Image (cartoon, helix red, strand yellow):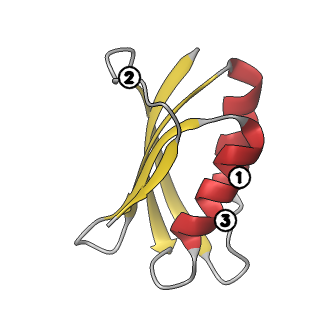
Amino acid sequence: MRKVRMNVQGRVQGVGFRYMTKMVADELGIKGTVRNEEDGSVSIESVGDDEAMTQFIKKIKDSPSPAGRVTYLDIQEDSMMEEHMNFKVIN
């Protein structure tokens, strides 16, 4: 299992980005959270198997929302991240 934290920047708030991220996560079996940050970015905590995580990261880079646009994506592996039962949109 991979545990990955992402910070996504670009046109990612007000375009359905979090809800489309949840749809992609549910489709791939990824667990975790997605939330808006005050600086206009979106933070994602995600847990899933290697293949699903690779697909998830690619879909985030490409923006799961048609109206969104990702200009920067910071990805950090975090083996200490708590595991989640499902994928939730926060705030």
Name which residue lies at 57% across and 67% down: 19
User: Please, what secondary structure does the residue beneath circle 2 have?
Assistant: loop
The residue at 58%/14% (across/down) is 1
**Is 7 situated above or below 67?**
above
Q: Is residue 53 left or right of residue 18?
A: right
Q: Report, in whole angstroms, how far the alpha carbon at label 2 lies from the one at label 1.
A: 21 Å
Where does residue 9 sit, x and y in percent of width and height? 44, 66
* Circles 2, 1 touching at the beta carbon (< 8 Å): no
Residue type, label 1 = Val
Q: Nearer the viewer, residue 76 or 4?
A: 4
Amino acid on which disc 3 is placed = Ser
For residue 63, the mark is 3
Residue at x-position 67% and y-position 84% = 67
**N-term-proximal mark, 2 vs 1:** 1
Q: Position of residue 53 (x, y in %)?
A: 66, 31
Q: Which residue is mark 1?
A: 24
The residue mark sitting in front, 3 or 1, is 1
Q: Residues within 10 Å of mark 2 (few under 14, many from 20)?
A: some
**Residue that numbered label 2 is attached to:** 78
Q: Residues within 10 Å of mark 3 (few under 14, many from 20)?
A: many
